[in-house]
Image (cartoon, helix red, strand yellow):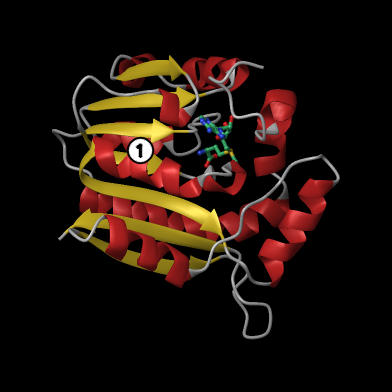
Amino acid sequence: MSSNENVNNPYHRTAESYEKKLNLPIVRSFRRAEERKLKSLFDSMIRADDTVLEIGCGTGYYTRDIVKRAKHVIALDDSDTMLRIVRERLPEADRAKVEFVRSEGTQYAPDEQVDIVMHIGVLDYVKEWEHFLTHSLTHARRAVIFTCPTDGLWGQVFHLLARYEGVRIQRYHRRQIEKFISEKFPGWKVEMELVGLNSGWTGAMTWVAALTRA
Ligand SMILES: C[S@@+](CC[C@H](N)C(=O)[O-])C[C@H]1O[C@@H](n2cnc3c(N)ncnc32)[C@H](O)[C@@H]1O
């Protein structure tokens, strides 16, 4: 594997079946709250003139929403198969607004800052998360939107299941993100919300985070 791939990315092996996984009733149900929150962020934050860099676009689950709201989208993934699927699935008019890039996220630098950087479901597989977030914040003019697993019960379950595939899942707590941003990027504001299977005794599955320039 070259350094232009995340070696901890399981989708190099499972890209073809990702869409099937997304359609499982259990996955649809825990993604529902995440999707609702993300779409409300898209509505309030993406402007018609924006360029959005979406790292880890996968099969385009969110790309198709982002492209409707923005002027230009850079859809990046380090899996060729994912990029083929997203390219095929977008309607022609939307595809014309999208630039497809095959690269590991931090190995790519846009020619100039983009308005918004996003990564939905990617920090799960990233070992050097501070480096990854530094890259996002450096290339974003206005905002960074991302999701990541919590360090609660569901995060532990996800982590243990993934170990069978030889994949390491990173889990996050609010203070770790807030501390990093306040120390390294003091000009940025952090908002984080818990979504997905959120009950009193289990805690939630996923953080949805929006970082904005204060
Ligand atoms: C869980 S999928 C999420 C896909 C899509 N964002 C969604 O929400 O449906 C994670 C995606 O990130 C890609 N990925 C993982 N690590 C990456 C990295 N370091 N750089 C670029 N893409 C990465 C994978 O190939 C996969 O397509």
Q: Secondary structure at mark 1?
A: helix
Residue at x 29% of width, y 44% of height: 137
Looking at the picture, tell me which residue is in the foreground, 206 or 171: 171
Q: Position of residue 67 (x, y in %)?
A: 32, 31
Looking at the picture, tell me which residue is in the foreground, 210 or 36: 210
Residue at 59% over, 29% down = 6
Q: Residues within 10 Å of mark 1 (few under 14, many from 20)?
A: some
Q: Residue 109 lies in what quarter of the image?
A: top left
Q: Position of residue 119 (x, y in %)?
A: 44, 42
Name the spot of residue 124 as percent of width and height, x first: 59, 48
The answer to which quarter of the image holds residue 30 is bottom right
Question: Most extreme residue toward the bottom, as rendered?
Answer: 200
Foreground of the two, 105 or 186: 186
Q: What residue appears at the point 67 percent right and 17 percent down from the top-left corner? A: 1
* Ligand 1 contact, mark 1 (Cβ < 8 Å): no
Vertical placement of 183 versus 122: above or below?
Answer: below
Looking at the image, residue 166 sits to the left or right of residue 214; the answer is right
Q: Position of residue 214 (x, y in %)?
A: 15, 61
